Image: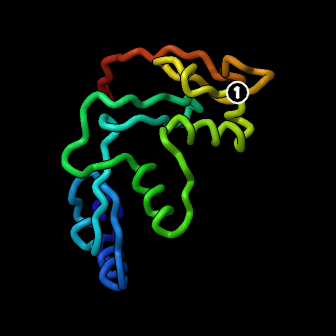
Amino acid sequence: MLSDPDQAHVLEGLEALDFLVVQDIFLTETAQYADVVLPSCSFAEKAGHFTNTERRVQRLNPVVNPPGEAREDWVIIQDIAKAMGSDWGYRHVSEITNEITRVTPQYAGLRWEAIPANGMQWPSNKNNPQARASCTRPSLLVVAVRWSNTV
């Protein structure tokens, strides 16, 4: 709710809902309007991967245990699917990564166990198995300087 500059508009929308489910790591302002809050893990409490705007795929490895009843996002979503009659059968987040690599050409060569600590850039495929950056990027040096307005 706080991320929208027109909070009155958001509040009006939330109050108009018949039923609201929120999945979050703590009781946010939005979650306070929820009929059901699903406790999720923070990035430091779960395994997975994400891709940043540089196309770098990075692994997440848990460094602490989640508190209370918090669970990983994929587990929560899979349990909802199962309750609705679809058993996806994932046992580990790496199986989801494997499926992504089968259906997404840019990730075709990505292997869960081969993602290094500093990540790797897509595309990753048979022509680019090491996922080396294939887009050109300008070289630049950023230097801090003291600025003063002498006018």
Q: x%, y% of residue 18?
A: 36, 85
Asked where in the image residue 13 lies, by quadrant, the reply is bottom left
**Mark 1 packing: few (<14 Cα in 10 Å), some, or many (20+)?**
many
For the C terminus, give its image quadrant. Answer: top left
Colour mapping = rainbow
Q: Quadrant of residue 15?
A: bottom left
Which of the 4 image quarters holds residue 5? bottom left
Q: Position of residue 103 (x, y in %)?
A: 71, 44
Q: Is residue 107 left or right of residue 54?
A: right
Identified at 31% across, 60% down, the residue is 38
Per the image, label 1 sits on a secondary structure element best described as: loop
Name the amino acid type tagged 1: Gly
- Residue at 30%, 37% (x, y): give it: 45
**The one of 89 and 135 positioned closer to us in this rendering:** 89
Residue at the image position 26 percent from the left and 65 percent from the top: 31
Give the camera-side residue of 6 and 1. 1
- In the rendered image, residue 125, in percent from the top left (x then y), is placed at 74, 27
Q: Is residue 21 left or right of residue 27?
A: right
Number of numbered tags placed on the structure image: 1
**Where is the N terminus found, in terms of image quarters?**
bottom left
Judge whether 15 appears above or below 42 on screen.
Answer: below
- Give how far across and how far down residue 111 sits, in percent: 61, 26
Residue at which label 1 appears: 109
Residue at coordinates 54% horizontally, 22% vertically from top-left?
113
Q: Is residue 9 left or right of residue 123?
A: left
